[in-house]
Amino acid sequence: MTLFCRLLLAGSMLLGTGCRNGNEKPVLNKEQMVPVLYAMMIADEVTLQKSFKDSTITLKQLRAGRYEEVFALYHTNREDFWNSLKYYEARPPEFKVILDSVEAVANRYRTQQYVK
């Protein structure tokens, strides 16, 4: 999962030089983005594992369903999440803070599982 974070960060840094409007604000703040982004990564992993077992359903269909579950869980929607993600991707220092927080959360959960 950390590889995915690093690839996402690298891609966002390359795309981060796009047009910016100084007046725009993200719908989701940094504290809201961290759990949603982490849940999206978990949903991707679950979807990938399920796609290996059931070849009749496309990966795109599975992901769309999982993403909607994540959005419902965190009381947001696809449009607000993607707009906020684009906002932070255009600002690499802020996006790095979010990705570092996601990685810290993932490490914390992983450590808690081994302690039990």
Image (spheres, rainbow, N blue to C red):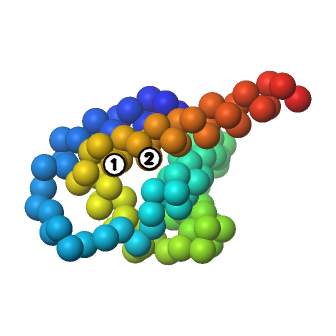
Image mark for residue 32: none
Q: Which residue is mark 2?
A: 98
Residue 99 drawn at (x, y percent)? 44, 42
Determine the residue positioned at 31% across, 70% down: 25
Residue 48 drawn at (x, y percent)? 56, 43
Q: Which residue is mark 1?
A: 94
Disc 2 and disc 1: Cα gap in Å? Answer: 7 Å
Quarter-of-image position of residue 73: bottom right
Give the left or right position of residue 23, taking residue 61 as reference.
Answer: left
Residue 114 against residue 52 in the figure, above or below: above
Tag 2's secondary structure? helix
Residues at discs 2 and 1 in contact (Cβ within 8 Å): yes
Mark 2, Cα crowd under 10 Å, few <14 / some 14-19 / many 20+, is: many
Quarter-of-image position of residue 49: top right
Residue 66 drawn at (x, y percent)? 59, 61
Determine the residue positioned at 29% across, 43% down: 93
Residue 115 drawn at (x, y percent)? 84, 25
Quarter holding the C terminus is top right
Give the left or right position of residue 91, taking residue 56 as reference.
Answer: left
Residue 82 versus residue 115: which sits nearer the camera? Answer: 115
Amino acid, disc 2: Ile
Amino acid, disc 1: Glu
